[in-house]
Amino acid sequence: MYLLNMKLPAKAGHADELANILLDASRLVATAQGCKLYAVGKEQNDLNTVYVTEIWDSKEDHDNSLKVEGVRELIMKAMPIMDGQPQKLQELELLGGAGV
C-alpha cells in the first residue's frame, strides 16, 4: 500500500475554502480504484494550513486518481488560494495496521 501525507498552505483567510475544495476532492476519489483513505484536516494552532492523508493500494492508483473526472478542475480552483506549493511530508510504503 501507499501512504501520502501532504501539507497545503493557504493564503491568509482561505484555509476553510481550501479545506472545502479538498473535501470535494475526497468525494470524487472515494470511488477511485485503490482508494482506502483520503482524510482532510487542520491544526488548531495553524489557521492557514490544510493537511491531507491518503492511503492507496498502490502509488499507481494514487497517480491515476488525478484522472478522475472533476479532480483537475478542483486543483485549478485551489491553486489561486494557495500560498505556495503543496509539500510532501511523508511518502511511505504502508505495511499495514488497524483499519487498513
Image (tube, rainbow, N blue to C red):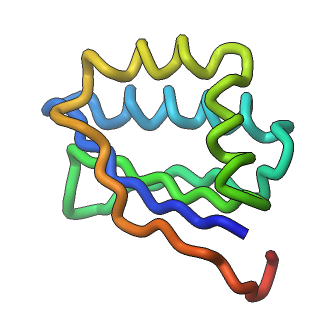
Report x, y in % for residue 38: 64, 51
- Residue under the image location 54 percent in, 11 percent down: 73
In this view, the residue farthest toward the front is 60
Q: Is residue 39 left or right of residue 16?
A: right
- Frontmost residue, 57 versus 54: 57
- Frontmost residue, 55 versus 9: 55
Residue 42's image quarter? bottom left
Residue 85's image quarter? top left
* Above/below status of 89 relative to 70: below
- Residue under the image location 78 percent in, 86 percent down: 98
Quadrant housing the C terminus: bottom right
* Above/below status of 57 relative to 25: below
Mark count = 0
Q: Is residue 9 left or right of residue 93?
A: left
Report x, y in % for residue 14: 26, 28
- Frontmost residue, 32 versus 37: 32
Report x, y in % for residue 44: 29, 62
- Residue under the image location 60 percent in, 57 percent down: 54
Quadrant housing the N terminus: bottom right
* Above/below status of 56 relative to 31: below
Report x, y in % for residue 96: 75, 85
* Above/below status of 3 relative to 34: below
- Residue under the image location 52 percent in, 50 percent down: 40
